[in-house]
């Protein structure tokens, strides 16, 4: 029976040119306008990154190396191997590499100023707003790390990184750089041990003055950004479109026909949920297909794309049913009108559809990610940047949960027999 | 077959329905006659289980359907006053949708759709979108959508509102046919007394949430057996003439519509000579005067003091 509801809604939608215009043509036009208009702003190669990084070392790396060398001497292995190992290790002391070849490298000179401090100065520099990132190196960091990497000790040391919230974009840049360094360092060490390290390089080698390259993530151009931003915004209009139609169904008494045919309330709501979900999926797919054809917005991981799209559609389905329930309860289209004319714009702003508000502050970033469109957008952008699904799976789960909670709420809000105005 | 027992419905301070008793026997066409706002639609919404009553009961074959409406709904078709259709679907698509909602499928559904289209005279226009239909065609389809599952009982709420006389006749004939050929029991609400008079075996007259009278046409008209309805046409309505009529002890009721004055008087009174005398005294020129056979409209007028379509 749900199939009939879906078919009916599809037929109504494709015959309603005004709605089609709003749901498909308008977003695509906006993508085109914003994509062209903001190309110079979003695709600029110039990076205004000026990061001041403070390094506070609690121990001494040279002492760590000596301690490690002593340990190696007591290990049962041929002397030649011990010698080779220590030579390798001496060349790749992690904090020295971080300081000299990463943060203090020539490539990053225009962007990063590094300064070293004593542990006693830590509190002072933490209170000082001057530094973008403070890297605190715990005592015996290098010794513990080498033991972990080479002898498989379980303890894995961690650098403490303090981020200046007021300088989020720059801080993110440095943070990603250090994370990347840690990943690469571990890998290189393992391969070095196996004698396989020929092609891998530390991230600094790839620095060409662009953050995207440093972080090894695909750059997002304006068309890509607005394809996602505008699509996740306009899919929200579908929820109000669906609820508005459902209310017409009630006001024309067609809904009464459904009741008289013993169609259960829950089935009706499920039909609205699934119809919204499917139409939203088609809407998004069509918009992304158009963007792929006209603006070459390509998805590197199609499976992740489909999963995120479905999760976003679940959230839209939940909103659609919730708006329907509210409209039925107050017997007015005002809920849908308020949602489409006010709430969507606010959600779009918070979610970053107009510009990346998440870069304004950590708070805005978190707030944006709490909106369904913002969460969807984050997930989409991560796919486009080459992240793996596992790295944003919680966003996908959040979207599904959001839709599910809205659906349950809509069942609770939906008026019972006799309560309907 | 179906019985409403002392049903009342209150909306905050308003008594929309006030202790209504009503029954339908199998194969009957029952009329529920009353002006707009009389409480007809609320009554049939309760009877069709769409809204629960504040008090009272609705019984199908002596079994209450208030808490378990499924049994009644299975055998019930309702034609609402509104056009309960999807304007962006064709007539056929609408019928297919509602048929499927009633769990019809395959060849049975197709056959029922053809049959209903034929019955409501829309076979030729079945692929046209409903939004392009005339008011009469929409009304016919509105009825058709309630017939797909072959209900034993059909409730029609003012199914001819706002349509041309030709479509209206078509609908009335269709209702008669459904009753005769399919043995369908019909509850028909209207504020057009001629429709109710044409269709119904028994009639309930309703106003302000109350049933004022019930019975066969003849029984209801007999309410007026003690009165004459005299219709006077005057050249020009004269206020003193109207006032004199209202003040006269043998005149029970006076209503004025344009130049036509309707007067109810006791049968035994010598009404003509009294009327002529008043006309002479107030210098009123009469152009015609006649005693009318009482209609349901007259009965309603008698019972409420208001015309049905006011």
Image (cartoon, coloured by chain):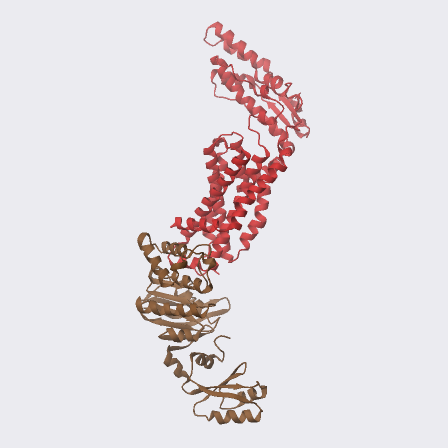
**For this rendering, which residue is in front, A48 or B53?**
A48
- Quarter-of-image position of residue A126: top right
**Residue occupying image coordinates x 67% and y 30%:** A127
**For this rendering, which residue is in front, A37 or A157?**
A37
**For this rendering, which residue is in front, B69 or B236?**
B236
Mark yes or no: residue B231 visible. yes
Rendering coords of residue B266 (x, y %): 45, 89
Rendering coords of residue A89 (x, y %): 54, 12
Farthest front residue in view: B124
Indicate whether A49 appears above or below A88: below
Rendering coords of residue A2 (x, y %): 39, 49
- Quarter-of-image position of residue A90: top right
Indicate whether A212 appears above or below B103: above
Indicate whether A380 appears above or below B202: above
Identify by letter the chain in brown. B
**For this rendering, which residue is in front, A129 or A153?**
A129
Mark yes or no: residue A352 visible. no
In the image: residue B110, left or right of residue A177: left
The number of numbered badges drawn on the structure is 0
Rendering coords of residue B33 (x, y %): 43, 73
Indicate whether A185 appears above or below A164: above
Q: Colour of chain A?
A: red
**Residue occupying image coordinates x 55% and y 41%:** A28
């Amino acid at each position: 029976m749900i199939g009939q509801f879906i078919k009916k809604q599809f037929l109504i939608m494709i015959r309603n040119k005004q709605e089609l215009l709003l749901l498909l043509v308008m977003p695509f036009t906006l993508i085109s306008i914003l994509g062209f208009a903001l190309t110079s702003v979003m695709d600029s190669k110039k990076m205004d990154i000026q990061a001041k990084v403070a390094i506070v070392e609690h121990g001494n790396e040279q002492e760590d190396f000596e301690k490690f060398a002593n340990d190696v001497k007591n290990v049962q292995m041929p002397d030649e191997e011990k010698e080779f190992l220590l030579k390798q290790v001496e060349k790749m002391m992690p904090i020295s590499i971080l300081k000299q070849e990463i943060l203090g490298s020539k490539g990053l000179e225009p962007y990063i100023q590094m300064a070293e401090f004593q542990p006693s100065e830590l509190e002072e520099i933490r209170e000082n707003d001057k530094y973008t990132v403070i890297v605190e190196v715990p005592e015996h960091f290098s010794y513990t790390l080498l033991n972990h990497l080479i002898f498989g000790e379980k303890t894995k040391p961690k650098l403490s990184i303090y981020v200046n919230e007021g300088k989020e974009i720059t801080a993110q840049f440095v943070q990603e750089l250090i994370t990347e360094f840690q990943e690469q360092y571990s890998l290189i060490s393992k391969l070095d041990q196996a004698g396989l390290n020929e092609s891998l390089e530390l991230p600094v080698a790839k620095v060409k003055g662009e953050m995207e390259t440093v972080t090894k993530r695909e750059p997002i151009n304006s068309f890509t950004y607005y394809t996602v931003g505008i699509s996740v915004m306009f899919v929200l209009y579908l929820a109000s479109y669906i609820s508005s139609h459902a209310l017409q169904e009630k006001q024309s008494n067609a809904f009464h026909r459904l009741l008289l045919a013993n169609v259960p309330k829950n089935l009706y709501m499920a039909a609205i949920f699934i119809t919204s979900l499917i139409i939203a999926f088609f809407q998004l797919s069509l918009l992304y297909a158009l963007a792929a054809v006209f603006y070459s917005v390509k998805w590197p991981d199609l499976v992740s794309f489909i999963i995120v799209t479905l999760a976003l559609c679940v959230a839209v389905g939940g909103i659609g049913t919730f708006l329907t329930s509210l409209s039925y309860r107050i017997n007015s289209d005002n809920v849908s009108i308020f949602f489409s004319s006010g709430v969507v714009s606010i959600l779009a702003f918070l979610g970053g559809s107009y510009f990346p508000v998440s870069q304004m502050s950590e708070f805005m970033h978190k707030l944006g990610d709490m909106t369904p469109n913002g969460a969807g957008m984050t997930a989409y952008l991560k796919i486009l940047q080459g992240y793996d699904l596992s790295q944003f799976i919680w966003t996908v789960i959040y979207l599904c949960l959001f839709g599910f909670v809205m659906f349950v709420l809509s069942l609770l809000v939906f008026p019972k027999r006799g309560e309907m105005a | 077959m179906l019985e409403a027992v002392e049903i009342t419905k209150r909306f905050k301070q308003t008594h929309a329905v006030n202790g209504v008793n009503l029954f339908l026997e199998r194969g009957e066409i029952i009329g529920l006659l009353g002006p707009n706002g009389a409480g007809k639609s609320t009554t049939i919404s309760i009877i069709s289980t769409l809204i629960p009553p504040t008090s009272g009961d609705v019984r199908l074959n002596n079994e209450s359907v208030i808490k378990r409406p499924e049994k009644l709904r299975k055998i019930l078709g309702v034609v609402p006053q509104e056009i309960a259709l999807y304007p962006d679907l064709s007539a056929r698509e609408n019928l297919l949708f509602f048929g499927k909602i009633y769990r019809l499928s395959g060849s049975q559904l197709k056959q029922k759709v053809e049959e209903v289209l034929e019955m409501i005279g829309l076979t030729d226009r079945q692929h046209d979108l409903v939004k392009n239909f005339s008011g009469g065609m929409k009304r016919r389809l509105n009825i058709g959508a309630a017939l797909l599952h072959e209900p034993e009982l059909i409730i029609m709420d003012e199914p001819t509102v706002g349509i041309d006389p030709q479509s209206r006749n078509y609908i009335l004939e269709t209702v008669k046919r459904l009753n005769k050929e399919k043995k369908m029991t019909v509850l028909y609400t209207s504020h057009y007394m001629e429709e109710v008079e044409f269709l119904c075996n028994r009639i309930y007259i309703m106003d302000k949430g109350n049933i004022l009278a019930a019975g066969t046409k003849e029984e209801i008209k007999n309410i007026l057996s003690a009165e004459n309805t005299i219709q006077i046409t005057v050249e020009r309505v004269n206020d003193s003439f109207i006032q004199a009529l209202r003040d006269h002890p043998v005149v029970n009721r006076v209503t004025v519509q344009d130049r036509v004055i309707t007067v109810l008087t006791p049968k035994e009174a010598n009404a003509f000579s009294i009327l002529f005398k008043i006309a002479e005294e107030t210098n009123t020129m009469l152009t015609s005067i006649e005693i009318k056979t009482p209609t349901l409209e007259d009965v309603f007028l008698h019972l409420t003091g208001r015309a049905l379509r006011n």
